[in-house]
Amino acid sequence: MKSSTLVSGAFVVAAQVYTALAGTAVRGSHDITHVIRGNLQLPSQPPVPNAVRSQGCWSSKGNMTQATAVVSTEVSSGKCTGYCSTNKFPVAALQGDECFCGFAYPPDGDQVADTKCAFPCPAYPQEACGQIGHPGFFSVFNTGVNINPPNYEPPSSSTSSSSSSSTSTTSSDSQKSSSASSPSGPASQSAEATPTDAPTDNKKKTNVAGIAAGTVVGVVVLGGLLGAAFFTMRRRRNAEIEEEHRRNAAVNAFINGSKPPSTSGSISMTDSRLDPIMAHRRLSDGSIADNEDYSRRILRVTNA
């Protein structure tokens, strides 16, 4: 009877101790196994809409950016996740005294054991804020804004895949070109004729451009020669007309009894009949006797 009472009393005491430990060590939705094992990192939990859930410890933060509004002395899981969810970021991460927000989890395969994250948060040392170091570890949370965010894919992986695909494409192209260049009848002849067509077209274009340039130059030169010939003939014609006018003036001056035109081209209008001496002189002096009457006939006898 006493033994059964002692056993029942022991069970009651054990239950009370368990309840006390659970009430003092567990905060929010923390798992009791987390406190019993002594780990600071909260274990991973399934995401829930509009609720914060731990996603474990990771070796990188992906493409998340630092939340500068969170002061280092106030960094805790509640402070960081609250800031990220308010700004509509579905993912949050903590490392030491730094808080990060983002739209995607770190790269797939970067999740590590929870024991890697063991640095106490500055504002709540009972929880882990990743692990400081280079690169260190990060405590990642889902803020409930999006319960199914993707995993971040580093550019190196996409670059390597694209480079490998381009390498395979290049190798296949080289194989095709080598097979096409092999002497195998008409196919090889057509493949060899293709690269020679491009230089021919270039030569044709060059020849056409040269011919056009030569034609333009020839037209310009011919126009210049024609213009020079026209001006030369016109000048010669004007000289001939002036010479003809000079000759006509000399002839007219000679006919009218004036002096011939001077060498300067001017015509002298001097007339000898306008000389005052010649004007008072009778041109008939010595030719007819003025004292005789020639109106009557006079018989003149001449000695035979």
Image (cartoon, rainbow, N blue to C red):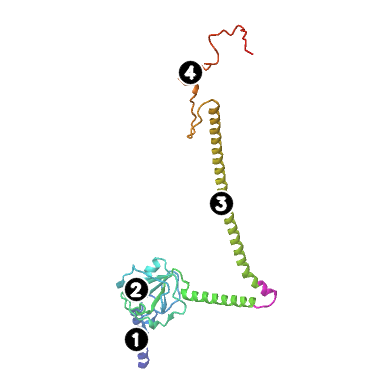
Q: Which amino acid does label 2 sit on?
A: Glu
* Distance between the alpha carbons at the discs numbered 4 and 3: 68 Å
* Distance between the alpha carbons at the discs numbered 4 and 1: 181 Å
| Relative vertical location of residue 266 with respect to residue 111 in this rendering, above or below | above
Label annotation for residue 221: 3
Residue topped by disc 2 = 98
Residue topped by disc 1 = 13
Name the residue located 64 percent from the left edge and 73 percent from the top edge: 192
Residue ranking furthest to the top:
296
Depth check, front residue: 190 or 207: 207
Q: Quadrant of the C terminus?
A: top right
Residue topped by disc 4 = 279
Stretch of the chain drawn in magenta: 182-190
Q: Counting residues from the N terminus, which is met first, the one under dot 1 or under dot 3?
A: 1
Q: Counting residues from the N terminus, which is met first, the one under dot 4 or under dot 1?
A: 1
Mark 1 and mark 3 in contact? Answer it, CB < 8 Å. no
Q: What residue type is labelled 3?
A: Val
Q: Does 150 appear in magenta? A: no
Q: Tag 2: Cα neighbours inside 10 Å, few (<14), some, or many (≥20)?
A: many
Q: Counting residues from the N terminus, which is met first, the one under dot 2 or under dot 4?
A: 2
Q: Is residue 171 visible?
A: yes
> Secondary structure beneath disc 1?
helix
Give residue 203's position: percent from left, percent from top. 60, 64
* In this rendering, position of residue 260 left or right of residue 12: right
Q: Does 189 appear in magenta? A: yes
| Relative vertical location of residue 197 with respect to residue 255 in this rendering, above or below | below
Residue ranking furthest to the left:
73
* Distance between the alpha carbons at the discs numbered 1 and 2: 43 Å
Q: Which of marks 1 and 2 is in front?
A: 2
